[in-house]
Image: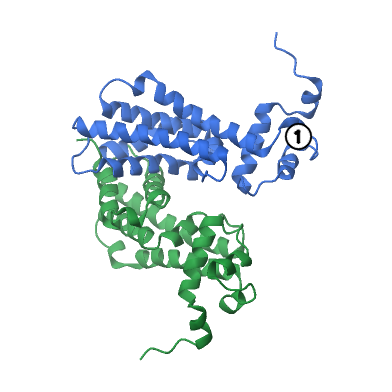
Chain colours: A green, B blue
Amino acid sequence: MATPTPTRQRRRGHDPESVLSIAVGVFNERGYDGTSMEDLARALGVTKSAIYYHVPGKEQLLGRALDRALDGLSEMVADERAASGPAIERLEWVVRQSVRILVDRLPYVTLLLRVRGNSRTEQAALKRRREFDAFISRLVKEAAAEGSIRPDMDPALVTRLLFGTVNSIADWYQPSRGGSSDDVADALLKMAFTGLRV
Amino acid sequence: MATPTPTRQRRRGHDPESVLSIAVGVFNERGYDGTSMEDLARALGVTKSAIYYHVPGKEQLLGRALDRALDGLSEMVADERAASGPAIERLEWVVRQSVRILVDRLPYVTLLLRVRGNSRTEQAALKRRREFDAFISRLVKEAAAEGSIRPDMDPALVTRLLFGTVNSIADWYQPSRGGSSDDVADALLKMAFTGLRV
């Protein structure tokens, strides 16, 4: 049997998961810096004092939300499929997986992509994001060294363009409009790896 | 002989062009909504009352800045090279030209890409941007109809991915780091049109 939710919490209708999800929506809409605890309380439908029952502070919510995006990327990097086999195939798997994470965790990844390093929490997130960028960069270089990427392409530029394309999905993807993450990943992989031209 | 700059203006060291350029820098750094006339005055090194000598208001500056980006796109759409010849070649020219405009007018295009429609000025800019998007969308469909794009690719998805890649350049391009707009455009066109894989 599941542990029963404490009565007070259940009565307000917010478990930690829904608090996080609502808060991330507000951060993305108003910008993190432009969001006050009052805005969060309003979105949750609780009084300003009750918000502190749900969450100690705004930055703690931000940290949890950014971890939600970054943990997805870390798990991917640690996966066997990112570690063995021809680099070009690992790269294609990583691109596909990145699209999946972006689509599955869209509001969290959107928030991550807007982080500029304005606080310790943001700096810690940027540090983790840079580790991921370095991982991708090494993978593209490996694929080039194995002769699987056109030799007239600069690997650093390839990395930026490829993950620029992945990240730009956050600007237009709407779950309601249809098109699964795999449809989008298929199209991106076809375009980038084999080209649009007949 | 050039018309002499009025003494007051010259003494303050700001012509309309430098006011616009400094203001756009502040908008991009703080966000347009987060920028006050006081922030602009500080960045220009003038008093808060003197700022109104340079510019009637924040939104007027925003409008001028967004036009700077949008006029580049409009000129491109009106160009002969966007109007005749095989659609796939026009599309490649339009992608190259879009990268050039983005790099040449980087702060203005960056500002445009962040517009969400919060005021009449922003709504007018979004309307012009949507016209450009519709133009691109038609061009991709034409190229598909002419049989120049892989038939297993959805033209709407191609349009989004292609211009997502172009727009994402604004997130990482740094003029100081080298790499001209043509280097970036060459790499993007190679990747998207002929593919990365050897």
The structure residue drawn at horizontal position 35% and vertical position 21%, both measured from the top left corner, is: B81
Q: Position of residue B86 (x, y in %)?
A: 25, 24
Tell me the chain of label 1: B
Q: Position of residue A40 (x, y in %)?
A: 57, 67
- In which quadrant is the N terminus of chain B drawn? top right
Q: Is residue A115 visible?
A: no
Residue under pointer 1: B52
Height in image: A25 above or below B2? below
A12 or B177, which is in the foreground? A12
Residue B71 horizontal side relative to residue B192, left or right: right
- Locate residue A108 relative to residue B92 in the image: left or right: right
Check the picture and name the quadrant holding the C terminus of chain B. top left
Asked if one can make out residue B154 in the rendered structure from this viewpoint, the answer is yes
Three-letter code for the amino acid on which mark 1 is drawn: Tyr
Return the residue found at the far top: B1
Q: Quadrant of residue B94?
A: top left
Q: Residue at x 42, y 68 (%)?
A: A71
Find numbered disc 1 in the image and state the secondary structure of the residue it sits on.
Answer: helix
Q: Write the residue at 77% across / 38% down.
A: B45
Is residue B106 or residue B155 the one in the foreground?
A: B155
Q: Position of residue A168 (x, y in %)?
A: 41, 48
In the image, farthest residue toward the bottom: A1
Left or right, A44 with respect to A93, comes to: right
Residue B44 appears in which quarter of the rendering? top right
* Residue B179 higher or lower than A131, as above or below: above
* Residue drawn at (27%, 27%) of the image: B87
Seen from the viewer's position, the closer of residues B16 and A36 is A36
Q: Is residue B129 left or right of residue A121?
A: left
Viewer-nearest residue: A138 or A189: A189
In this rendering, the count of numbered labels is: 1
Q: List x then y, in percent, for residue B166.
A: 41, 39
